[in-house]
Image (cartoon, helix red, strand yellow):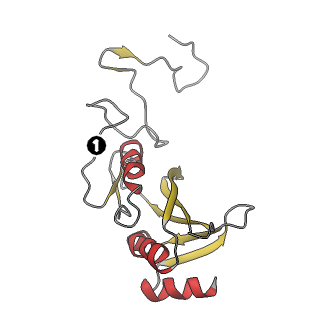
Amino acid sequence: MKELLKKINTAAPGALLENRPFGRTATISYWVEVRSIESVAQEFCAGCGFSGLENMSAMEIEQTIVISYFIKSQSGEMAVLRCSVVPGSADSVAEVPSVEKVWSEAGRYEDEISELFGVVFGEKKRVHRLLPEGWRGFPLRKSYAFPSEFNSILHMRPPATGGGEIR
């Protein structure tokens, strides 16, 4: 692991913020400065043999969007790269460099996270694949208030004030 950390620090000085076990597993999680995620991903892929992106996910914790990249080496070793970004407001997008040039399979994950969380990856244009055209806002953000109707279709969820009946 020391050799890996040395390579990363040489390729992107100051980019690695923290490394520690991912939960109770032997997999190591590397927190990366968001502006350096592409160069660190490139080093993991080309310099350390982590050529496969197994999964990519996003979650919101206290108004911070955390992006996790689950990667696998050619020898079967797993690692998790993580970065975080804070959107300016509930309706504004947040910017994160794309890793699609490193792992081509990242494109679909980035599109989904962009649409549902409002994270723009690199210079990519946002596309609608999951939400209907005309949808406003980012429904997986905790601050998102679902509309009572969309295109004259009523939303069938109980009111946010709790305990109400389903209409």
In this image, 136 relative to 42: left or right?
Answer: left
Residue receiving disc 1: 127
User: What residue is rendered at 48% in x and 52% in y?
Assistant: 63
* Image position, residue 98 (x, y; %): 35, 62
Could you say which is closer to the camera, residue 165 or residue 130?
130
User: What residue is rendered at 54% in x and 88% in y?
Assistant: 6
* Image position, residue 122 (x, y; %): 30, 61
Q: Which quarter of the figure is the N terminus placed in?
A: bottom right
Could you say which is closer to the camera, residue 18 or residue 164?
18
Crowdedness near tag 1: few (<14), some (14–19) or many (≥20) residues, C-alpha within 10 Å: few
User: What residue is rendered at 35% in x and 33% in y?
Assistant: 131
Query: Where is residue 124, by image quadrant?
Result: bottom left
| Identity of the residue furthest to the right in this view | 24
Three-letter code, disc 1? Val
Vertical relation: 1 (above or below) 66 = below
Could you say which is closer to the camera, residue 77 or residue 31?
77
User: What residue is rendered at 31% in x and 32% in y?
Assistant: 135
* Image position, residue 78 (x, y; %): 62, 65
Vertical relation: 82 (above or below) 2 = above
* Image position, residue 115 (x, y; %): 36, 43
